[in-house]
Amino acid sequence: MTRPPRRPTWRAARLTGVRPETGSARTLRFEVPGWPGHLAGQHVDVRVTAEDGYSAQRSYSLAAPADGDAIELTVEAVPDGEVSPYLTEVIEAGDEVEIRGPVGGWFVWRPESTAPVLLVGGGAGIVPLMAMIRARRLAGSRVPFRLLYSLRDPGSRYYADELRRPDPGLDVAYLYSRSTPEGWPRLAGRIMLDDLAEGGWPADFEPDCYVCGPTGFVERAADLLLALGHAPGRVRTERFGPTGG
Amino acid sequence: MAIVSRGFHGRPRAGGDRLPPGQYLVDDFPVLSAGPTPRVPTDRWEFVIDTESGQTHRWSWQDLMALPSQTPTVDIHCVTRWSKLDTTWEGVSLDVLFEDVETAADYALVHSYGGYTTNLPLEELLDGKAWIAHRFDGEELAPVHGGPARLLVPHLYLWKSAKWVRGIRLLNEDWPGFWETAGYHNFGDPWLEQRYEDD
């Protein structure tokens, strides 16, 4: 297991760009001088400080491989949250926060890995999985990836244009839980055994499975993967509760 | 001097002196674990303490239920920054389980159904500081929160309170567990903000 750098230090991070993803989520690009690099799937701590010295910290998944000293986070506004409304509605290019990391050495995909990969994302859980998809593309890896992306409705899709573009060796399937596009073949509903049986890999291919999303979603998807015969040690999970902010 | 983030004001400060540095309060109970939730039926559950000299002490679920339990109300702090105040548990104090255990070991490696491990000095488990908890908030402990039983060591970050606990190995030397070998702090005191290795 790769150890993260010892004693991750807080670094000044300047916002250099913003891309809207949905009505309530946006991708933030920060310039972080001295950024040590990271693996796809890792996250960072973000610290924001008010003028009176009060500060708040939250963890956010990295959405893309590092580009020199530039990193990207995708943040969803949590209703009544404290930090996420600031990051999604207030902060502007040129403003500064502090970032430390990368953090997390378990929910990661390494470009030298050769096992097929199944990514199962629910809602904002797509973010670290997208970092893996982008890392695969950047590395020119030919490891086959399948993404099952469960989301409420077509309007809550992150990275819509990028996931629409062909990426050889990556299969993408959308599972809508509340409402589907016109004429969509799958009925709206939560993730089912058949979704994972058809859209995933057979267990005897021994794929690495990464499941990320709200707790209920991750519990369900991970249980279904075990029911399909996947070994518990090959099912890596990352959960976020309704709490956040 | 911290960098000020223009336009950030923060919430009215809550929690006061019961909130360790860098934490925020929650009312719900978020879930964090590295893999699928193990389901352990109580008729096959057991808890073991293995000493450094090779002695094994074993309790079935019925054995555990027959022991005197306590109902601690404690604050819990997760390294992912949420804290929850006044959580109510029911469980058996480790002092009760260690009553007949003869050991001179300094370290404990806690292990769980599902393969999770975490380490801590044995003294952090004794003297009323830790429990094998089997009820939360008046209900049976749900599998997603570590049921049927989890370790509860509320004075350390919550990853030390191993879910689905299966046993404790007593060791003469410290043996880092799952997160402790993945860059997290070996001890994990929330009041000293010991989140990551060498914090």
Image: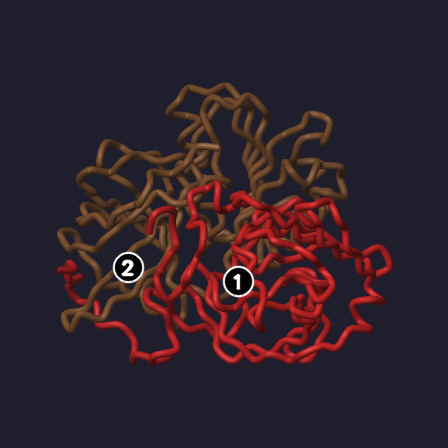
Name the residue tied to disc 1.
B124
Q: How crowded is mark 1: few (under 14 residues within 10 Å), some or many (20 or more)?
A: some
Q: How crowded is mark 2: few (under 14 residues within 10 Å), some or many (20 or more)?
A: many
Could you say whether the residue bearing mark 2 is in a helix, strand or loop? helix
Residue drawn at x 74%, y 63% is B100
Left or right, B46 with respect to A121, comes to right
User: Is B177 located above or below residue A91 in the figure?
Assistant: above
Name the residue tied to disc 2.
A87
Front residue of this view, candidates A222 and A57: A57
Amino acid type of the residue that numbered disc 2 sits on in the rendered structure: Leu
Q: Can residue A22 be seen in this view?
A: no
Q: In which quarter of the image is the C terminus of chain A?
A: bottom left
Q: Residue A151: percent from the left, percent from the top?
A: 54, 52
User: Is B134 located above or below residue A225 in the figure?
Assistant: below
Left or right, A141 with respect to A117, comes to left
Q: Which chain carries label 2?
A: A
Query: Residue B18 falls in which quadrant of the image?
Result: bottom left
Q: Residue A128: percent from the left, percent from the top?
A: 44, 43
**Label 2 with label 1: CB-CB less than 8 Å:** no
Front residue of this view, candidates A66 and A106: A106
Left or right, B158 with respect to B168, comes to left
Task: State the brown chain.
Answer: A
